[in-house]
Amino acid sequence: MIQWMNGHFRESNLRTRLLILFTVLILLPLSLQGMVTYRHFSATMNDKTEQYTIDIVRQISANLDRQLKDFERLSLMPLYDQMVLSILAKYNGSMGSGTWVQSDDYMKMKLYTSGQAYDRPEIRGIHLISNSGVLFSNVDAMAIDAVWDGRQDDWFTSLARSEGEWRIIPPHKPSYYSGSDAEAYISVARVIREPKTLARLGYILIDVKLEAFGGILSNLNVEKEAGLMIVDGLQRLLYERVSADGISAYEEIMKQGQPQQFESGHRKRLGSSDYLFVQHHSSYSGLSVIGLTPIAVIQKESREIMKFTLWFAVVCVAIVMILAVMLSYRITRPLIVLKKNMASVEQGDFNKRVTPLTNDEFGQLGRGFNKMMEEINRLFHEVFVLGIREKEAELSALQSQINPHFIYNTLESINMMAVQRKHAEVSDMVSALGKLLRYTIDKAGRLISLQEEIDFVQSYVRIQQVRYGGKLQVFYDIDDEVQDCRIPKLIMQPLVENAVYHGIDGQEEGGTIWISALRFEDELLITVRDNGKGMGEEEIDALNEEISKLPSYQSLQRNDEDELGLNNIYQRILLIYGEGGSLTVEGSLGQGLAVTITIPLQEKEAEQDV
């Protein structure tokens, strides 16, 4: 096999040999580096994801403690309110023997419980229960029993036996709710004792909606596929957020034993999947937060990296192959080019040249070929091609002179017809249009005098005044000392056009434009102001920022109407004068706009003005 490969390699052409050599030299180190980098990065990402999951569980436990402390503080509030204690003491007796209460006592307790539950959407109800079962609550009287016998609920027994410490009762459906309220609640409860005698006066029950525990999880970035649960010291489930597949992880864990038997931070298999088991126990509340994150989710980043690495390797192989082909082609191209050029010469094309030329043997052959072709081509041009091009140049020059003069003569004929028929406005517009065409076509240079630009603007204004029927007024304030200053051609007319079409157009009363030019130290200030629609302050700031941006390919391809045509003017000023030139827009909504161009005066102009 190796002998066959060696024989095939020796018999292949130069381009094939170079292609194989480049491919091997590039792919070998790239493959090794990719494998090492992937293994290291994948292990790091898995460790960080596992640590992040552990931190999330700890944060959930801390948030849960913070909320439970708030509920515990709320359960202590009746002990500091003598009014509450005295009312509970009035309705003493055996559980279930209570009767209807006085309306005054009912209203006081209603206001108290409602105030404690105010702005706490997570609380369904706060209930104060006397020893006889008289129930005071912030819940509507039609939705809750007035007298309740707690002995009918199993969970009440453990509360009655407590000595005043607060208790968390797992999800249950309290029997004191009447009507259709069949939801389950988690309750924070406490026995209320008289502070001086420690005599039992009653109970406080705070029913918390299950959504309150879900809200703790919603504020954290927990994976959808991960399962989270909260259990008490007796391993009773308080809350569970099942994973995306809808399977309860609590039941699976209880089948395998008590959760506290499992080591936190290690992998555990539940059903057909492996999970990262994380448990955090709170010494304050006695609750445990358990998180079960699928190992597949933890390794998701690693799999994405692997996919990216594979696709990246495919792209690299493709790029390497392309580069190898290009390099091999570039090395052998001189011979191929020389061969193709010689074939073209055989067909009568004497304009072929070999470029670029190198200093090796291929370059020497190319130089000899080029010299031969230059001599043949020179002789050919002297006899035939040179004469044809001279005739074409004469024809083009004659045509370039005829076309503008034909337009001018035509406009002059229209003007004479308008004068003969006494159409003064038509005559004025045709004359102004002729001046515009002469100005834009005849002026070859890009810098002209300010007075020439003003004359051009006046011709444009005349056409617009006829169009708007006298509703457009333009005033000029040009200092005599700046009339000969050199400025870029066609730089003022776009400003006047913007003032007409974007400021004044559409106003029934028409508008006014003021054009001024003055010298300030070594700068020429040109301002075009109108009393048109104007723009808001934020729009003007955004426009100035957009104008001052450096040119880009996208901005050159965009329609200038987006910046009222000002961006193009600013770029021309920037190209000619550099940072010395500027263009700014000022104004306000409903008061018009003022566009000011700052042009630095040339040294010769400054000396003449002194």
Image (cartoon, rainbow, N blue to C red):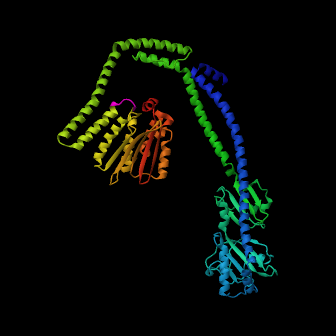
Decide if residue 355 is on the left or right side of residue 427: right
Q: Is residue 104 in sight in this rendering?
A: yes
Q: Nearer the viewer, residue 554 or 356?
A: 554
Between 581 and 152, the one nearer to me in the picture: 581
Q: Is residue 174 left or right of residue 324?
A: right
**Rendered location of residue 530, percent (x, y):** 39, 48
Residue shown at 39% from the left, 42% from the top: 516
Q: Position of residue 538 (x, y in %)?
A: 49, 51
Write down the region rendered in magenta. 442-447
Name above or below for residue 564 compared with residue 29: below
- The residue at the far right in this view is 197
Q: Quadrant of residue 126?
A: bottom right
Camera-nearest residue between 159 and 601:
601
Q: Is residue 275 visible?
A: no
Residue 304 x %, y %: 64, 45
Q: Nearer the viewer, residue 198 or 25?
A: 198
Query: Mainly helix, strand or loop, the magenta region?
Result: loop
Query: What quarter of the picture does the N terminus occupy?
Result: top right
Q: Residue at x 31, y 35 (%)?
A: 437
Seen in the picture, residue 480 relative to 247 is either above or below; the reply is above
Q: Position of residue 470 (x, y in %)?
A: 29, 49
The residue drawn where x is 20% and y is 37% is 416
Please say whether residue 316 is one of the residues in the magenta stretch. no
Q: Quadrant of the C terminus?
A: top left
